[in-house]
Image (cartoon, rainbow, N blue to C red):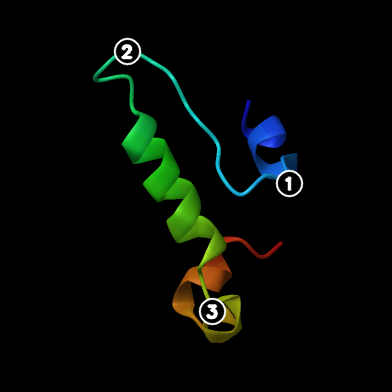
Amino acid sequence: MIIKFLEDESDEICVIRPSNYGKTTNLIMMQEFFQMNYENYENSENRKLFEN
């Protein structure tokens, strides 16, 4: 579902699910992920956790 959502080129997408299904939570989570500024994480302590 997420891949189809991201590949869709329309301006609006209607997500129909029952209440308390997590629609808003998932949309906010994806928004925060794609708006992250990864350039600031280059020298971060968190980066060390994911290096080989």
Q: Which residue is mark 2?
A: 18
Which secondary structure lies at badge 2?
loop
Query: Where residue 9 is drawn, which disc sits there?
Result: 1
Residue at image coords 32%, 19%: 21
Describe the element under mark 1 as helix, strand or loop. loop
Q: Residue at x 56, y 60 (%)?
A: 34
Q: Which residue lies at the image location 25% right of the left edge and 17% below the top edge?
A: 19
| Residue 34 against residue 9 in the figure, above or below | below
Residue pictured at 67% horizontal, 44% vertical: 10
The residues tagged by marks 2 and 1 sit, at their Cα atoms, a distance apart of 25 Å
Q: Is residue 44 left or right of residue 52?
A: left
Q: What kind of residue is marked 3? A: Tyr
The answer to whether residue 26 is above or below residue 16 is: below
> Relative to 10, is 24 on the left or the right?
left
- Residue 30 placement (x, y as % from top left): 49, 48
Where does the N terminus fall, quadrant-wise?
Answer: top right
Which residue, given by chain and number where applicable, does mark 3 sit on?
A: 41
Mark 3 vs mark 2, CA separation in Å: 37 Å
Residue placed most toward the observer, 52 or 25: 25
Circle 2: residue type? Pro
State the residue lying farthest toward the top. Answer: 18
In this rendering, the count of numbered labels is 3
From the top left corner, tell me how far across and down residue 18 is, in percent.
32, 13
